[in-house]
Amino acid sequence: MPNLFPASPDAERHLVGVLIRDGLKFPADLFPSDFSEPTLQDVCYSIQQIEQDGQTADEFTVINYLRNTNFDRPDAFISGLTTDVGFASYNPAWADIVRRESILRRIGDTATKAASLAADPASDPEAIIAFTEGQLKAVQGRGKPADSGPIEMPLDALAAFDRKSDPNNMIGNRWLTRGDSMLLVSQSGVGKSSWALQFMISLAVGRPFFGIKAARPLKVVMTQAENNGGDVAEAFQDITSGMSLYPDEMALLRDNLHIYRDTESVGPEFLKRMRELVVRHAAEVILVDPLLSFCGIEVADQQQMTDFLRHGVNKILGDTKVIGIFVHHTTKPRAAKDKEGQTSADLAYAGAGASELVNWTREVGVIQRQPGDDPIFKFALTKRRSRSGMQDAAGQFANEITVRHSRTPGVIRWEYATDSDIAPTKPDSSPAKAPPRRSRDWEG
């Protein structure tokens, strides 16, 4: 069966290469078995043995140690590791990635073994339970730092941080990194759910979404409460058809995107289900649509919002390093005069509820309908917009763009609005005009 929890060979090799090149200590919270490549496991074991002997595990000592083993061509392999990292500085995040993905592989292996045992009618259920519990307890707690409380950020590590090759970067230029959060805000009826689905499909196959691009194809989970199977199917068909995905991209999409409908989970139960879905699919992004259907709190209450976000959602994002994107409703529409002079930053607070929601999240994207009969909208990023890579219809980087529903009647898809779409209509320029064509508005 396919490996559901792939390793990160780049992170593994970079970590070991820098450790050897600079003669650094092997991370205390890692084991050689955490590495997916057997050759790297052997190298890491040699580093530990050299350190136990009181020596520095640099390129010279590691090569000499491996020469006395059955390791094939240690000179070339170790030199290749240290050369490939170039001038990159040590980044603790590499060790976090190696440990996290080792845990996910261990969980996946345990699940596969348990399923195999359960398929045998002669198996003892209690023995399978004991085996599973024992294997999971062996990795319990390894996904988080051993010490609770504040974690110091050493100044040397901050000074050496390579902002151009952050292994935690997932989308844009460190726009959204592992464990970050985002709100997608709009009033009801504009098509937030179809916008969210098109965004998630783009992330899953590694395609740009109005210029916003993931570092690579990402594993995505969507859990939503307001659209039935037919609603989602129609949007899925129209979006994927409009993207003209290649067969290999469709195969990638089947592996990377998982969509659920959940109309029951609320509050603590939702947080439990959210964590289960992230772990089950090794998700790197989870989209929740809409937040109000799942949080189970009075969103205008600052304390309830703080407890739910900072002590509930944050725990999941921090432990699993998943990016959380939450679809959210605005308050009732404001009068035009109240919107005058609004900046993009002001739009961040358009969502219903306490200000804590905006203060907590890393980014807020807002979809606003524009005046007129045609389905024309402005999409604005409000907090970290310069890092997103978003582009307008002319291919220029932009903090806000003008978009619209598909021009084809009945098709559920988002596209750029053209100048002719947004050009003001001259008064009395023609007799009575026919009603505008409307594309179907699919909204959750």
Image (cartoon, rainbow, N blue to C red):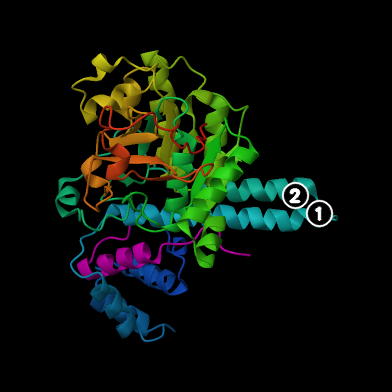
Q: Check the picture and name the quadrant holding the N terminus.
A: bottom right
**Residue found farthest to the front:** 431
In this rendering, the label closer to the viewer, 2 or 1: 1
Residue 375 or residue 135, whichever sits in front: 375
Q: Which residues are magenta?
A: 1-30
Res 338 quadrant in image: top left
Which residue is labeled 1 in the image? 123
Query: Callout 2, which amino acid?
Result: Ala
At numbered mark 1, what does the secondary structure look like: helix, strand or loop?
A: loop
Q: Is residue 63 visible?
A: yes
Q: Are marks 2 and 1 in contact (CB under 8 Å)?
A: yes
Disc 1 marks which amino acid? Ser
Q: Could you tell whether 117 is left or right of 336 in the image?
A: right
Disc 2 residue crowd, few under 14, some 14–19, many 20+, Cα 10 Å = few
Residue 372 in percent (x, y) is at 35, 28
Determine which of the numbered discs, if any, sits on residue 127 in the image: 2
Residue 137 seen: no
